[in-house]
Image (spheres, rainbow, N blue to C red):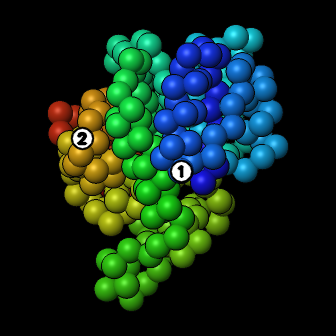
């Protein structure tokens, strides 16, 4: 399993690389943002560990550049800035998870395994619910989600999704015309053991809204003030 670590602090690089090597992972290292971006685009990795504070090109910029290229590789962002604003900024750039320094080895490994497991589930499985309904395509109005190819489209136009966006959209499409609270979404999309502020849900719903709710098309993802979100056709 190949991981890319983009981190400029030698002590942190040594700590993470040694621990992950012992856990069975093959870790490549980039010491600045520009070289990290180059390595991430030229070689194949199952996960990227990305520090925010990097010389030359910071982690936020690197993450945005990777997502702009439609790269869906899970990204775990490391930051010494643990405020909600900074965490949301990292997630808004396209990161799938974050970890605030300093952190324990076991927590780092747990986050990595969780991201890899969720990404693998998204890429390789058709959920039982789809089989029970004898269909591999979910449809709400003109929005379609193919569970076999893991692809979304609206009016026949492909919608490029990250692994987390895909899971969120799938959950919403399995529960159309029902108000979904932030906590319900957090528990079912990220997992009940995933320790994250519910503001993360707002960030990812906003991602989907921009991709699904286009200006020339009826809005499907709607906010129910004080309650959560709903996926339904406009009346």
Q: Which residue is mark 2?
A: 182
Residue drawn where x is 51% and y is 25% of the image = 15
> What is the quadrant of residue 193 in the picture?
top left
- Residue at 62% across / 16% down in the picture? 10
Q: Nearer the viewer, residue 52 or 143?
A: 52
Res 159 → quadrant: bottom right
Determine whether, in the image, residue 1 is placed left or right of residue 110: right
Horizontal side, residue 178 vs residue 112: left or right:
left
Q: Which residue is mark 1?
A: 24
Answer yes or no: is residue 56 visible.
Answer: yes
* Closest to the observer, 8 or 70: 8
Label 2 vs 1, first from the N-terminus = 1
Q: Nearer the viewer, mark 2 or mark 1?
A: 1
Q: Please give left or right for residue 33 compared with residue 192 in the image.
A: right
| Residue 61 location (% of width, % of height) | 66, 22
- Label 1 SS: loop
Circle 1 crowding by C-alpha within 10 Å: few under 14, some 14–19, many from 20: few
x and y, in percent, of residue 130 in the image = 38, 79
Question: Badges 2 and 1: C-beta atoms under 8 Å apart?
Answer: no
The answer to which of 197 and 205 lies nearer the viewer is 197
């Amino acid at each position: 399993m190949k991981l890319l670590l983009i981190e400029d602090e030698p002590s942190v690089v040594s700590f993470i690389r040694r621990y992950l090597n012992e856990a069975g992972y093959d870790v490549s290292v980039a010491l600045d943002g520009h070289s990290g971006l180059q390595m991430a685009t030229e070689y194949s990795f199952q996960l990227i560990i990305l520090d925010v504070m990097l010389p030359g090109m910071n982690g936020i910029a690197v993450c945005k550049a990777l997502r702009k290229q439609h790269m869906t590789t899970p990204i775990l962002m490391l930051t010494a800035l643990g405020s909600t604003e900074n965490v949301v900024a990292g997630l808004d750039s396209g990161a799938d998870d974050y970890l605030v320094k300093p952190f324990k080895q076991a927590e780092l490994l747990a986050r990595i395994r969780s991201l890899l497991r969720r990404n693998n589930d998204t890429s390789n499985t058709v959920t039982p619910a789809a089989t029970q309904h004898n269909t591999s395509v979910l449809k709400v109005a003109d929005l379609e989600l193919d569970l076999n190819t893991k692809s979304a489209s609206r009016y026949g136009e492909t919608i490029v999704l990250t692994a987390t966006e895909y899971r969120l959209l799938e959950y919403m499409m399995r529960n159309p015309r029902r108000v979904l609270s932030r906590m319900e979404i957090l528990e079912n999309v990220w997992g009940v053991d995933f320790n994250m502020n519910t503001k993360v849900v707002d960030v990812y719903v906003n991602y989907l809204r921009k991709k699904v709710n286009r200006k020339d098309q009826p809005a499907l993802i709607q906010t129910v003030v004080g309650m959560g979100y709903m996926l339904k056709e406009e009346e």
